[in-house]
Amino acid sequence: MSAPVSAETTSDQPRRRGLQALRSQASAVPRQWLPGVVGYACLAIGLIDITSAVFPRFRATRMHTWAGQLPGGTTTLAAAGTLMVGMVLVLLAHALRRRKRRAWRAVCVLLPIGAALHMLRWHQFVQAAISLALFVVMLIHQREFYAKADPRTRWRAALNFVVLGTVSVLIGMAIVSVRWKYEIGDPSLYQRLEHVGYGLFGFEGPIHYTSERISDLVGYSLGALGLVTALTTAYLALRPEKPEPELTPEDELKVRELLARHGKRDSLGYFALRRDKSVLFSPTGKAAISYRVVSGVMLASGDPVGDVEAWPGAIKVFMTTAREHAWVPAVMGCSEVGGEVWTREADLDALELGDEAIVDTSTFSLSGRAMRNVRQMVKRIERNGYSCKVRRVGDLTLEEKRQIADAAARWRGTDTERGFSMALGRFGDAGDDDCVVVTAHKAPEEGESASGGDDLKAVLHFVPWGDDGISLELMRRDREADPGLNELLIVAALQEVGAMGIRRVSLNFAMFRSALARGERIGAGPVLRAWRGLLVFLSRWFQIESLYKFNAKFQPVWEPRFLVYQQTRDLPRIGFAAMQAEAFITLGMPRFGRKRQRQGLMPEVPAQLGKAA
């Protein structure tokens, strides 16, 4: 018969299990500071190694005495090895800060090799001990480095070759120049550059030295630089290619099905069909989130598409994917309901970005004192011979589609089409027949031939917002046309789309609209006035105040839109990524010897996709 269990022991069991659970949860919580400390430590050590290998006098300083305790040595081969290790550490520093698993593996391979070299060749046991200690630390905290690789293409190999090759040449010039006392003769700058070029490929250059040790040191160092450049470029070029973010035909059909059932809820839902986005679905397949990864930021836009009850499942998949890759999660332009779900389910914060202007076509009218300026402008532009056509894109001929797409691309002020969160980025695709296009034409002048008249002067393009709404995604006009064309186009759309069964029209998004509106009121405080003054100043380069005032002409209902983010310190990084996604900042390979091609709007995709949809 077993001994009776005391009440005290029985009552302690749940408490002990609770404490064990808390300890396991605490051990599983990522240490936010550790990857940053490791990354910056690698960067510092790498820079010290490079400096000690390049500048001989650095070895005589106190800093070199401290740096001598780090992996590396003072012999000729060790100096070249130190240079190579320093270059690799600098390259791995950023990846370590982002918790990349491959960077952790590379460090774990390099440290034991370095320790073995210290003990077997140079008998430097202190440096070997430090290498092994760091190796042990990396093994203990291996769970902190869990992130998968980012989406990639072959272009990164070319970019690595150009950037790292340039850095190698500059470091090589420093290595050759600081040893001028040992040179035979007086070599010119071109001969130094030629010597560096030969040395990077492992050949002896035109410069000769009085000391064989210095000659070997320069040769090994230049060879190490060339080897690092070659190995990293070869790795990036030969690794399995993973395509850029794209919306596959299968995913596009699934998203279209979700929009057909739930697209009425969000005016930005149709922009999930941009083909330069990826998409994640909830476990049930009833909700989806489209996103793009830009500079380590996993950037979504608008609310999730689909059933609201399935949003938490899609958000969980989104956050899990961001955590697996150590991406910074962010959402641009979500609604108030979407912001509440994101903040509740993902423990994120929300910041009001601005307001979306929405007009009800059933109540819109040009009559009244508030619409006097718009009414007068429309009448004046009509007297100048302009007229509008409002049609579905599916009702256009192929020639009309090409004419509108070419004109819109020609009127664009940049080579690249801008937009991400509130732009479709294409026109005339077979799957977008339900979109609405409004065009402005000018009648021929008196005495002008009929063939030269009825010219296309401006265009608006709206995407569907459920079955009774449309959302503006493109507004372009001929820069030489008369002012007021945009007002004419919007008024024509608001007056005529009602016959198509459209009641809601979403116009432009006005950033920081509430701050501008409150800052110009009587009684606004000094802080609010200063904030409004800054926004007005920034409006010289970005359309902040002008979009707000333009939208306000049509007496819309303002719906707030939010930015959802994880930590306040991530806001600058998210802002930079958003500027890149919207194409306000473009980072790419330079184009030498040929003119940059202007990006068009007509997509070259099979028409079967649109017919199947």
Image (cartoon, rainbow, N blue to C red):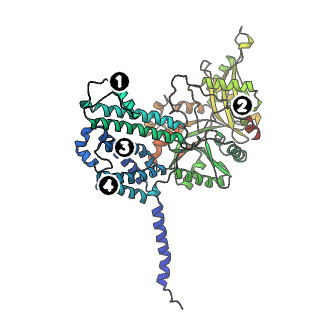
- The amino acid type, in three-letter code, at marker 1 is Tyr
- The amino acid type, in three-letter code, at marker 2 is Gln
Going from N to C along the chain, the mark reached first, 1 or 3, is 3
Going from N to C along the chain, the mark reached first, 2 or 1, is 1
Residue found at x 40% / y 44%: 88
Q: CA distance from mark 2 to mark 3?
A: 67 Å
Going from N to C along the chain, the mark reached first, 3 or 4, is 3
| Mark 2 closeness class: few <14, some 14–19, many ≥20 residues within 10 Å | some
The residue identified by callout 1 is 190
- The amino acid type, in three-letter code, at marker 3 is Gly
Q: Is residue 522 left or right of residue 225?
A: right
The residue identified by callout 3 is 86
Q: Is residue 229 left or right of residue 491?
A: left
Q: CA distance from mark 3 to mark 4?
A: 20 Å
Q: Pointers 2 and 4 in contact (CB under 8 A)?
A: no
Q: Is residue 357 left or right of residue 72?
A: right
- The amino acid type, in three-letter code, at marker 4 is Met
The residue identified by callout 2 is 495
Q: Pointers 3 and 4 in contact (CB under 8 A)?
A: no
Secondary structure of residue under mark 1: helix
Residue found at x 57% / y 42%: 241
